[in-house]
Amino acid sequence: MPTAFPQEFRRDMSLSPGDDIEMDVTEEGLLVRRPNTARELFGRLKGCVTKDNAVEPIDPMSLKRLIRAGD
């Protein structure tokens, strides 16, 4: 059954109708968060790898599979 959240809460969380959320019950109360999409995660990681800390090259198809696995 869908649950409606107050408008101020939805605005503060940048939620739109149909957005996914995750909810967990903790000792402090209810924890509500937006799950990270692969695109958001990749966006936050962009620029982390530089020529000074570069890693081994990755096959583009392997990267695509990893991104899809996170969605």
Image: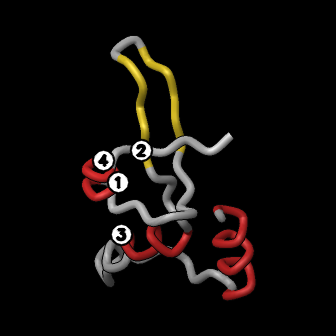
x and y percent of residue 50 in the render?
A: 31, 80
Kindly identify the residue that appears in the image at 69 percent across and 85 percent down.
59
> Does residue 11 sit above or below 40 in this rendering?
above
The residue located at (55%, 69%) in the rendering is 38
- Mark pair 4, 2: CA separation: 6 Å
Residue matched to label 3: 44
Of residues 42 and 58, the one drawn nearer to the viewer in this rendering: 42
Q: Badge 2 is on which residue?
A: 5
Image quarter hosting the C terminus: bottom right
Q: Nearer the viewer, residue 71 or 2?
A: 2
Considering only order in the chain, which callout, 1 or 2, is on the residue closer to the N terminus? 2
Vertical side of 15 occupied by 6: above or below: above
Residue to which mark 1 is pinned: 10
C-alpha distance separating marks 1 and 3? 23 Å
- The type of residue carrying mark 2 is Phe
- Callout in the foreground (3, 2): 2
| Circle 1: residue type | Arg
Amino acid on which the number 3 mark rests in the picture: Arg
Q: Which quarter of the rendered picture does the N terminus lie within? A: top right
Q: Total marks drawn?
A: 4
Distance from disc 2 to disc 1, alpha carbons, whole Å, reads: 6 Å
Tell me the residue that label 4 is attached to. 9
Q: Secondary structure at mark 4?
A: helix
Quadrant assignment, res 12: bottom left
